[in-house]
Image: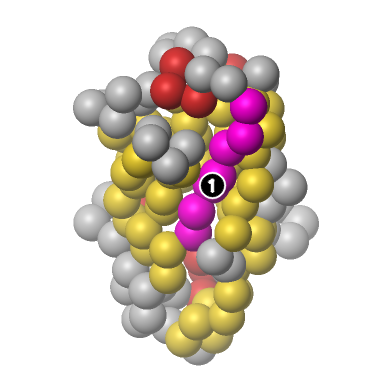
Amino acid sequence: QVQLAESGGGLVKAGGSLRVSCTASGRSFDHYSVGWFRQAVGMAREYIASISATGEDTWLAAYVKGRFSVSRDNAKKAVYLQMSNLIPDDTAIYYCAASYGSSHLKLRSTYDTWGQGTQVTVSS
């Protein structure tokens, strides 16, 4: 079992960039796929991106393609979400989650463990 903690959120102006991190503790982090989700006020939690356990495969939701990317460093037990060209609609709490499997990574129910989230606010 791993535990996750997000960091790196903050306030950024529209058009700016931000990288949020997901750091794991516990064993066998390199056996877990990791997903990123976000939840805006009054909205459902939505899928953003995911990365396989080895980092060889990444997937992005269509609405962030070309603006966001996901990567990981298993030696540091960390996964990163790099966000650029941010818009006010990107304002949300950003969560990372870990799954021991590698299927259905767009579904919240796939994930075994969630972090507490980090707030990202994009001002206009």
78 or 112, which is in the foreground? Answer: 78
Image side of residue 19 versus residue 23, left or right: left
Element under disc 1: strand
- Residue 27 vs 92, above or below: the answer is above
Q: Residue at x 66, y 18 (%)?
A: 1
Number of marks drawn: 1
Q: Where is residue 51 in the image (x, y as percent from the top left)?
A: 37, 32
At a point 42% along the width and 70% down the height, the residue shown is: 18
- Position in image of residue 64 (x %, y %): 35, 53
Q: Residue at x 31, y 51 (%)?
A: 69
Image position of 96 (left or right of 60): right
Q: Residues within 10 Å of mark 1 (few under 14, many from 20)?
A: many
Side of 12 relative to 116 (left or right): left
Q: Magenta region: which residues?
A: 20-26
Most common SS among magenta residues:
strand
| Vertical comparison of 51 with 28: above or below | below
Q: Position of residue 85 (x, y in %)?
A: 32, 73
Residue 103 in sight in this render: yes
Vertical comparison of 1 with 61: above or below: above
Residue 38 among magenta residues: no
Amino acid residing under circle 1: Cys
| Residue matched to label 1 | 22
Q: Give the residue displayed 68% in from the left and 52% down from the top.
A: 117
Displayed quadrant of residue 33: top left
Residue 10 spot, x, y in % from top left: 59, 75
Q: Is residue 14 left or right of residue 96?
A: left
